[in-house]
Image (cartoon, grey):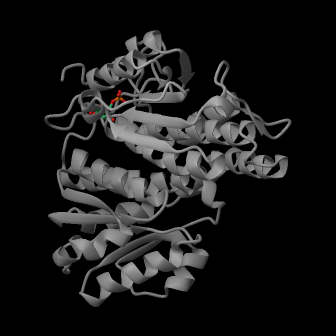
């Protein structure tokens, strides 16, 4: 059937608003909500695996980057995360006891497909996380883990990204259980947290008016920096990618701890710094990076929760306050404000949001 924009001005913002539903469907598919457990995707024996390689491009790569933190923490499984265009030519040795995960919305990205074939050639089994089930990558993989995002039309990926995160989070919990790392209680708590994500996303979407007002100011700048630690680091990278893709404002994402090794030289009042910092075990570290920014006249857009806002106690350009939630799911929910910020900034800039210049939805050439 034909997909239309409904009441929305662009496909992108429609797809942003579909996320509570799409993530709800996807987590329900990978979790057993009655028993509070995560299902191991059929055929994958996580107890027998000693290493994971995750390979993808663009936004899908950042989903894999978040998952590295999850698999390492919840399943004690070391993860190599790689951009497909690098992975395919590096000729790295791959362990036969390792598993490769490739992530692709379209299932047709040329570099990701080539990486899949390389890993296969090294004797590895391949799990593919794809949104298009009848795709080349799905066909050539040993295990197919679908995202239930429905067709994504906006070139800038949104709901496919959070659906990828949903599959990866559920699978990391399943791996943690299979490997004897997580107790039953820990598994239940992580599953419960994932089942709450759609509700938390609804809450995050209610901040749209505040974010739109902020975007009016952001549309005036030439450069913007995004900072985060832990799983908020890949979300900072994704936030910067979204902004540059659709608003054409130069944006960079950095691990907050790397600020002092270079980007701090750029800080002035003309370059806002978006700080993604839920009140978690590394919050205090990020606050000290914010203070370094503030001390140099930098303007901060802080995305946090009530406890974080109180603990930071700083003058900011804006503070966006999300509900409190377990650290295991912040990556999923904090994605919403960074998507909305990029979207509304692009609308103020007057760009072609759904079809940004020079970009394609699916890149089937090298
Ligand atoms: C293109 C799109 C991006 C996407 C990337 C990977 O560059 O513009 O939005 O993240 O390809 O696409 P895939 O279909 O493999 O997820």
Residue 270 in the figure: left or right of residue 34: left
State the image quarter where residue 276 is shown. bottom left
Foreground residue among 20 and 229: 229
State the image quarter where residue 344 is shown. bottom left
Q: How many marks?
A: 0
Residue 182 position within the rendered picture, expressed as x and y whole percent measured from the top left: 75, 48
Q: Is residue 69 above or below residue 313?
A: above
Q: Residue visible at 26% across and 69% down?
A: 217
Foreground residue among 336 and 173: 173
Q: Is residue 40 above or below residue 301?
A: above
Residue 244 position within the rendered picture, expressed as x and y whole percent measured from the top left: 22, 51
Q: Residue visible at 76% across and 43% down?
A: 180
Would residue 63 be seen by someone viewing this image from the given angle?
Answer: no
Would residue 161 be seen by someone viewing this image from the given angle?
Answer: yes
Foreground residue among 136 and 9: 136
Q: Is residue 307 above or below residue 156?
A: below
Foreground residue among 150 and 119: 119
Q: Quadrant of the C terminus?
A: top left
Q: Quadrant of ligand 1?
A: top left
Q: Is residue 216 above or below residue 315?
A: above
């Amino acid at each position: 059937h034909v997909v239309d924009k409904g009441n929305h001005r662009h496909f992108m913002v429609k797809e942003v608003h579909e996320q509570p539903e799409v993530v709800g469907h996807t987590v329900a598919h990978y979790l057993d909500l009655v028993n509070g457990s995560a299902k191991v995707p059929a055929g994958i024996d996580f107890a027998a695996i000693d290493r994971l390689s995750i390979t993808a491009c663009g936004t899908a790569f950042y989903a894999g980057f978040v998952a590295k933190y999850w698999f390492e923490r919840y399943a004690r499984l070391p993860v190599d995360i790689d951009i497909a265009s690098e992975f395919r030519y590096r000729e790295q040795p791959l362990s036969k006891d390792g598993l490769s995960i490739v992530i692709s919305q379209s299932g047709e990205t040329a570099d990701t497909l080539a990486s899949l074939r390389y890993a296969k050639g090294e004797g590895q089994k391949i799990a593919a996380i794809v949104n298009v089930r009848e795709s080349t990558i799905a066909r050539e993989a040993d295990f197919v883990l679908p995202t239930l995002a429905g067709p994504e039309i906006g070139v800038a990926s949104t709901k496919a990204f959070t659906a990828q995160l949903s599959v990866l989070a559920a699978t990391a919990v399943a791996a943690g259980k299979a490997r004897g790392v997580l107790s039953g209680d820990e598994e239940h708590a992580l599953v419960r947290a994932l089942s709450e994500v759609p509700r938390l996303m609804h809450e995050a979407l209610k901040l749209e008016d505040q974010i739109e007002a902020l975007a009016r100011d952001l549309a005036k700048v030439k450069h913007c920096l995004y900072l985060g630690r832990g799983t908020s680091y890949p979300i900072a990278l994704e936030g910067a990618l979204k902004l540059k893709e659709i608003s054409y404002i130069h944006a960079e994402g950095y691990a907050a701890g790397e600020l002092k090794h270079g980007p701090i030289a750029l800080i002035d009042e003309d370059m806002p710094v978006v700080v993604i910092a839920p009140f978690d075990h590394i919050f205090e570290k990020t606050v000290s990076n914010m203070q370094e920014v503030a001390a140099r006249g930098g303007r901060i857009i802080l995305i946090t929760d009530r406890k974080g806002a109180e603990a930071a106690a700083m003058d900011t350009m804006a503070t966006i306050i999300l509900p409190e939630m377990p650290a295991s799911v912040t990556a999923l929910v904090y994605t919403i404000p960074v998507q909305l910020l990029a979207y509304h900034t692009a609308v103020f800039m007057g760009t072609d949001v759904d079809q940004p210049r020079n970009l394609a939805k699916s890149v089937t050439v090298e």
